[in-house]
Amino acid sequence: MRIATRSSKLALAQTSFFESWVSKEPAEIVEIKTEGDKKSAMGEVLFDKAHFVKDIEKCLLDDEADVAIHSAKDMAASKHPELDHFFFGPKSRSDLLIFKNGADPFFEQDMKLGTSSLRRKLQAKFHLGAENVVPLSGNVNTRIDKLNKGVYDCIILAEAGCQRLKLDEDLNYIELDHLSCAGQGVLAVQYKPDNEYAKEFILEWKQNFLQRVIHDETEMEKKFLEKINAGCNSAIAVRANHVGPKGINKIIKGEVYGLNKYISFDGKSDDIDTAITDAVRMLNSKNGLELLNEHN
């Protein structure tokens, strides 16, 4: 099996995790330096996360790989017309507020806080009272190195990435209880519908209740974003949960962040589409789309 992936340490760790689940024999890893990796290396932070995905999708379409592994949060809200995907875990959805080694892990409003995410920037403003939020670029290790060299007092990173790089035990952090972006902490395997390798393990995964729930919850989050024409760079946090016996209750909740205020919304039903419709209705009733558009 040929597995296409970004060439970063985190992407390769995620690919190794996937390979350990499905491969009965060693796989061939097809490393791709995507447009997103090039932009990130140049210090850019405000670009569409699709730049991390499109080059890898082309690899699949050109039959240069059998499957591809992505961070689910980087994938577009709408499904690729020629490719299938399955979201899988385990997942860890939290963000971590990380302090320099040896520092007191207590946040003060005037601390220099680094993040490259508009959502995290505004959550820090509204939920932490942060007054000095500045851009942060580079891969996970680079960001942590900048922190410990004193470029920042603290930074925000996804817990999942730190765990997969086996860094979390050595970090000085507090776990934030904020909602995160759609698909955070979840991985995605993407493939052509007729790929024989994918057919084998996808069928097995769909019969696994836990994996099917992870997939369905992430699909629900993506479908909500598509419904309101938002994406992974939008100033929005969203989380879907399937709870109760056999996941019968579909719950979606989230927050939208404007320049000067934020709103919360939610929807609940035993039907995915109804829960999403209810959440969209509440978001609209609170002028949530107007808040999103304040950043355009």
Image: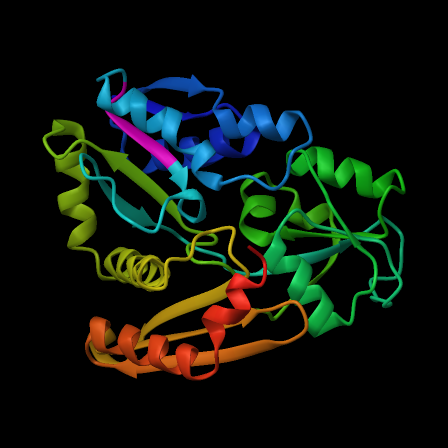
Whether residue 86 is situated above or below residue 268 in the rendered picture: above
Q: Position of residue 289 (x, y in %)?
A: 46, 69
Q: Give 10 or 116, whichever is nearer the viewer.
A: 116
Residue 93, above or below 88: below
Q: Which residues are magenta?
A: 65-69
* Residue 58: in magenta span: no
Determine the residue positioned at 59% across, 53% down: 159
Q: Main secondary structure of the magenta part?
A: strand
Q: Name which quarter of the figure residue 278 lies in.
A: bottom left
Above or below for 127 versus 208: below
Q: Quadrant of the C terminus?
A: bottom right
Residue drawn where x is 74% and y is 57% of the image: 173
Percent x, y of residue 282: 39, 82
Tell me, yes or no, whether the highlighted magenta stretch contains residue 66: yes
Question: Quick check: 85 left or right of 238?
Answer: left
Question: Is 294 left, or right, of 154 in this rendering?
Answer: left
Q: Position of residue 276 (x, y in %)?
A: 29, 73
Residue placed most toward the observer, 129 or 96: 129
- Counting from the top left corner in percent of width and height, residue 110 is at 89, 63
Q: Quadrant of the N terminus?
A: top left
Residue placed at 9% from the left, 30% from the top? Answer: 194
| Residue 103 appears in the figure | yes
In the image shown, does 247 or 222 lie closer to the viewer? 222
Name which quarter of the figure residue 64 lies in.
top left
**Residue at x-position 85% and y-position 68%:** 109
Give the colour scheme shown: rainbow
Compared with 263, 23 (above or below) is above
Q: What is the tally of numbered marks visible in this picture?
A: 0
Q: Is residue 143 left or right of residue 1?
A: right
Q: Is residue 244 left or right of residue 74?
A: left
- Foreground residue, 4 or 254? 254
Q: Is residue 179 visible?
A: no
